Image: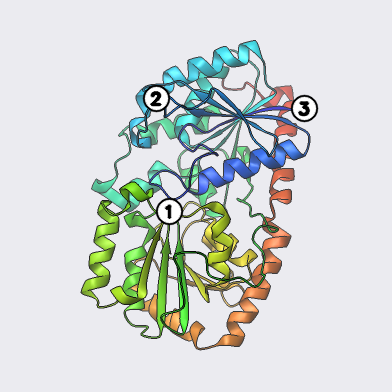
Amino acid sequence: MRIALVSEHANPLAALGGADAGGQNVHVAALAAGLAAEGHDVVVHTRRDSPDQPARVATEDGYIVEHVSAGPAQELSKDELLPHMSEFGVRLRDRWRREPVDVVHSHFWMSGLAALQATRGTTTPVVHTFHALGSVKRRQQGALDTSPPERIDLERKLCREVDQVIATCTDEVAELEQLGLPRSRATVIPCGVDTELFRPVPAMPPPGVGPRRRPYRLLVLGRIVTRKGIGNVIEAVAGLPDAELIIAGGPPPERYEGDPEVRRLRALATTLGVADRVVFLGSVGRHEVPTLIRVSDVVVAAPWYEPFGIVPLEAMACGRPIVGTAVGGMLDTIVPGRTGELVPPRDPAALRETLRALLDDKDRRRRYGEEGRRRAVERYDWTTVVADTAAAYRSLCADPLATGAAQ
């Protein structure tokens, strides 16, 4: 199949850990690589955010990344991109008129709008993955939500007009139904994990981590934004005097120290008297992530809300127990009492108690790690996720009545 993946802000070539570079980048890159490995012709279309970016990049994993000019060739936050999606869609339409594709898979709501515009008047099916929903963000953040005000209405439009939605977890399907998506047009295919890259092997601490400051090491990994609940983890660690916390991720080095959230978290650690055992690593390379996980006793993911959450899968694949908040995709991936534990969001006291019990029980940590590895391999390996996604594409391409219904 000739497959077009549209990911307007999440470039699979981008460095991870910035404000808008995280799980979606990993997801799109791994999906593209897996589909290419199956023999499909795969192109990822993403917005050009630098004048130095080449128009077309052939990756080592067999897929192509095309940088599409839409708006200024500079970094913009994703909340600033909506006015440029019409241009993005026009350029995609022109591109696909020259070289038609069999299926389009858009990622994030604005990519979906561009994909619908580009395929209007054709029978090319559009599959869409939201990755995050404005309705959930609005409910969780209220007045702090910086999304364009029309986002939720436009997400309803996508639910009406795309041919199929691939949801990443069961919790998302319920949210999509509230937006008007018929259950028959939703397919649950989770995010995946590379179980060869992420596997339980002995490891030495990567540069910047150094020797342990305390007997136990906890790890938080991902973007440094308030909703990720890193402040709640620091508050929990204040009550765990024998534990240190490694915080990996965030803006690039040149912007790290000036980042408002980094400054807030550093001040919190100082106020709570734990600055000597909270290590801020900053942005880390993808190749360093498995090692960081392996040298940690427990991985912690404590977001206030989370559409899916890839870090728990990476921890499980490395054979490490995970403690996460009971939100979004983590309700599917983490099995309490088997692979880790779930706690309420925004509850540092519950998080502290759960971590204390787990740190005090080495055998339980070992069992959770072993079961987590088995679960990651059996359910979340990218080969399975890619095969299920390709099957969803083929079902639309094979059924002409299922495509173009909303064109």
The x and y percentages for residue 166 are 60, 41
Q: Are marks 3 and 1 in contact (CB under 8 Å)?
A: no
Quadrant showing the C terminus? top right
What is the crowding at mark 3: few (fewer than 14 residues within 10 Å), some, or many (at least 20)? few
**Left or right: residue 346 compared with residue 212:** left
Give the Cα separation between the discs numbered 2 and 1.
Answer: 23 Å
Task: Give above or below for 41 relative to 179.
Answer: above
Give the Cα separation between the discs numbered 3 and 1.
Answer: 43 Å
Q: Which residue is mark 1?
A: 283
Q: Nearer the viewer, residue 101 or 223?
A: 223
Q: Quadrant of residue 375?
A: bottom right
At label 3, which amino acid type do we have? Ala
At label 2, which amino acid type do we have? Ala
Kindly identify the residue that appears in the image at 65 percent across and 21 percent down.
Answer: 124
The local secondary structure at tag 2 comes to loop
Q: Which residue is mark 3?
A: 398
At label 1, which amino acid type do we have? Ser
Between marks 3 and 1 in the image, the one whose residue lies nearer the viewer: 1
Task: Pick whichever of labels 3 and 1 is earlier in the sequence.
Answer: 1
The x and y percentages for residue 194 are 66, 54
Q: Which mark is residue 73?
A: 2
Give the Cα separation between the discs numbered 3 and 2.
Answer: 38 Å
Q: Quadrant of residue 104?
A: top right
Q: Nearer the viewer, residue 96 or 399?
A: 96
Task: Pick whichever of labels 2 and 1 is earlier in the sequence.
Answer: 2
What is the crowding at mark 2: few (fewer than 14 residues within 10 Å), some, or many (at least 20)? some
Kindly identify the residue that appears in the image at 36 percent across and 23 percent down.
Answer: 72
**Left or right: residue 66 compared with residue 31:** left
